Amino acid sequence: MTARILAVDDIAANLRLLEAKLQAEYYEVMLASSGPEALNVAFTQLPDVILLDVMMPGMDGYQVCTALKADARTQHIPVVMVTALTDSTERVRGLEVGADDFLSKPVDDATLFARLRALLRVKQVQDAWRLRAETAKDLGLESAPEPVISVTGARALIMAEIPQEMELVRNALQADSLKITAVTTIEEAQRLLSKGDFDLALLALPPDATEVLRLASRLRAQNNTRDLPLLLLADTAQKTQVLRGFDLGANDHAFRPLDPNELRARARNQIRRKRYQERLRAELDRSLEMAVTDQLTGLRNRRYVRRHLDGLLRTEEAAVLLVDIDKFKSINDTYGHNVGDVALREVAERLRVQLRAADVVARYGGEEFLAVLTGAPSAYALIVADRLREAIAAEPVRTGDVVLPITISIGVAVGGPGVPAEQLIGSADEALYRAKRDGRNRAYLADPELDKSGQ
Ligand SMILES: [Mg+2]
């Protein structure tokens, strides 16, 4: 998979070396030789990953990373710090400002590329979600504020055979108020994680890591755990297995001896990333919901029901019921729009409860509703229409001191596969017209003969 990488280093020779390595793997490379330049490129070019030198004159890597993570345009872009420093306090400092990982100079190729692949895989999924959420927002829907993502209450599973290691990891994570579940076997880990309600799994590699890597790969393949962050705990001598783990689906790693602060920072970053993704998904769901919902009545809207009917008529028989509130204009004129809105909502609700879950009822126009019944023959559709009519006429709508007797008229039309939705709704409209003309509070079936003569 090709991707755009921004490499940042104040020393030209380092940049050229990185550029050559990345280009040899067919990555598209952008270069920056200072903090401000890096920010400028990042904000305007939006790379997929940033490789960031820590030690730079003026603005250093920590400051650059802080600025990137504080900006909505770049906060989701993975940052890998490249450093000669091996001190764990420096690593933790980088993780605290939101870096995803560290590579030490000179950069080891296998580690660099395994890391890039793992980061890009996650980013690709996130980008897809973000794009869809933004598309939904473009449909004219409100955009939610972006609160800081907290890790409080997140659920982490630790799998470790050695009790001392378990204790160390548990204590490190509990300082962040994570809820910890401890297991010692792969079977137990698999069983609990498959339920899908964890935010992070930390998997300790035993001397033979094969089965744990297999577990990582299985978790990645399953729906419930596809986006679960996996963090491997390993000996430095197990570097090859860790890199293999990245390719099989692990997201991050920490080497023994484990540093509690580093572990905590890595766990936090992984959980934030997962929650960010969940938020995108929830925003998308909400946006889509709003895009197909009539805001006043909560029913589906015209756009949705038309699509639904078009789709249905490709393969199925369907009945359409075009419903109109009788003399609605006089309600608005007499009592005002607020009372009119109450009446619309009440009628909508009564229609909704009368229909099956598989049926769709939408607000089709001002005081017009359209119900679509799947696979309903005309006799049945007419019975349903009469039931709807009865449900409205039986009980006046009450709001404050106002008691409104309301009735509806309904035109019913039935069509099979291949009938254009437009024509079916037109037939229902014609029947509705006759119902109105004959005195309202009626449900009429479209006359097929009349339809043909009308064409
Ligand atoms: Mg430097």
Image: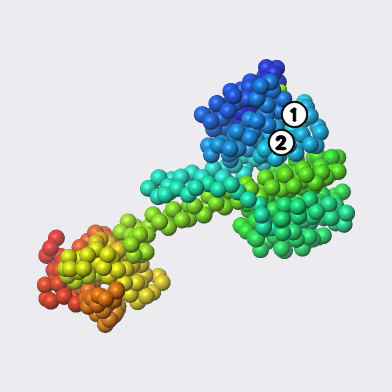
Vertical relation: 424 (above or below) 60: below
Which residue position is annotated with label 2?
94
User: Looking at the image, is 62 positioned above or below residue 287?
Assistant: above
Q: Which mark is residue 83?
A: 1
| Residue 286 appears in the figure | yes
**Which residue sits at x=13%, y=76%?**
439
Quadrant of image for the C terminus = bottom left
Q: Residues within 10 Å of mark 2 (few under 14, many from 20)?
A: many
**Which percent across, then down, holds residue 214?**
75, 52
Label for residue 324?
Answer: none
Q: Nearer the viewer, residue 81 or 228?
A: 81
Q: Nearer the viewer, residue 266 or 416?
A: 266
Dot 2 falls on a residue whose secondary structure is: helix
Q: Counting residues from the N terminus, which is met first, the one under dot 2 or under dot 1?
A: 1
Pinpoint residue 317: horizontal percent, then vertical percent.
Answer: 32, 68
The picture quadrant for ligand 1 comes to top right
Tell me which amino acid carries mark 2: Gly
